[in-house]
Image: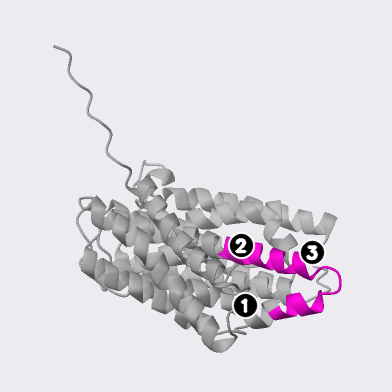
Amino acid sequence: MSRREDVVTVLLGTWLMAGLAVDGWAHTNLGGLETFFTPWHALFYSGFTATAAWILWSSWRRRQPGHLLIDAIPEGYGLGVVGLGIFAVGGAADMIWHTIFGIEVDIDALMSPTHHVRYAGGILILTSPLRAEWARPGPVAGMRQFAPALLSAALATSLTAFFFLYLSPFLDVDMSARETGFLTEEFSGGGGGYAYFSNLRGGIAGILLTTLILYASALLLLRRGQTPMLSFTVMFALVAAMIQGVGAFTRPWMVAVAGIGGLGADLLVRRLRPAVERPGSFRIFAGLAPILLWAPYVAAIALTDGIGWELEIWSGVVIWSGILGLGLSLLVIPPALPQASEKS
């Protein structure tokens, strides 16, 4: 595939993801869903159908006489074709599941086994342009060349974040004074302490899990090479935009906060030049970048709703995000193994 053809794959993948966001909004906000055949399912599956047709046609037109179709699949797209089959099986199983057990809503929809099958297929499909770029020799010259791989990674990251909506800090602001005040006052008669404690657990877990999701993708891209300026600004803002879209954009400023965190990561890349050949800089970046996301996040909540968590909790979770980033860097670029000594 050329990079221009990768752009087509990304655009069709965006269609598929837009259908997923609308479907997620329906499952979250609309009650009484009783059928598999809905407008949002139509948008979702039409995006899949268009993406599948494009990938298969792109392979078919490259087929040489006397060779199998599998030999003509473009580099980086082999797992994408596997993903098409997995997704199709998951979609058929999902229709049967809904027929037997009914339509899920809220967290039930995110935990449905057939939806996880579609997730596995979707990840393989959406990351095809990323794998194609990974296989190309040499560094990326600029954003124009890198855009298909970046957007491919952003779509896959958004898909992963979508399946953890119930913990996403880009959807529920668990640390706001408005939310924690409601918990402590509304339930003060019998379960306020427990409700507040549950709020803390969910909020802390959401920030730390989102850190893993975002920076696993970010560090993987840096493992391939230097990312152009604004790469992480775009990626983080797109992830937050999808999450907020499912929530009907009740807090649109979350998208800007995510973009600011991504911009902080982009500026760190320019300053530190993290790379496989510079593991020290790579680890410093991984430890500082998450803090540059969650510190503005806390500041934005303080300005809008006020902070309802104690100082030790919200400051501690920001520091923990940096520790997690540092830990991820050890997995992306592990310490070198000792060389085996030669026996004389």
| Amino acid at dot 1 | Gly
| Amino acid at dot 3 | Ile
Q: Note whether residue 275 is visible.
A: no
Q: Is residue 12 magenta?
A: no
Q: Mark 2 points at which residue?
A: 164
Residue 252 in picture, x, y percent from top left: 54, 85
- Which residue is drawn at the image coordinates 49% and 77% (left, top)? 297
- 1 or 3: mark nearer the eye: 1
Which residues fall within the magenta stretch? 181-206
Residue 273 in picture, x, y percent from top left: 22, 62
Q: Is residue 189 magenta?
A: yes
| Amino acid at dot 2 | Phe
Residue 33 in picture, x, y percent from top left: 80, 71
Q: Which circle marks residue 103 in the picture?
A: 3
**Quarter of the figure with the C terminus:** top left
Q: Main secondary structure of the magenta part?
A: helix
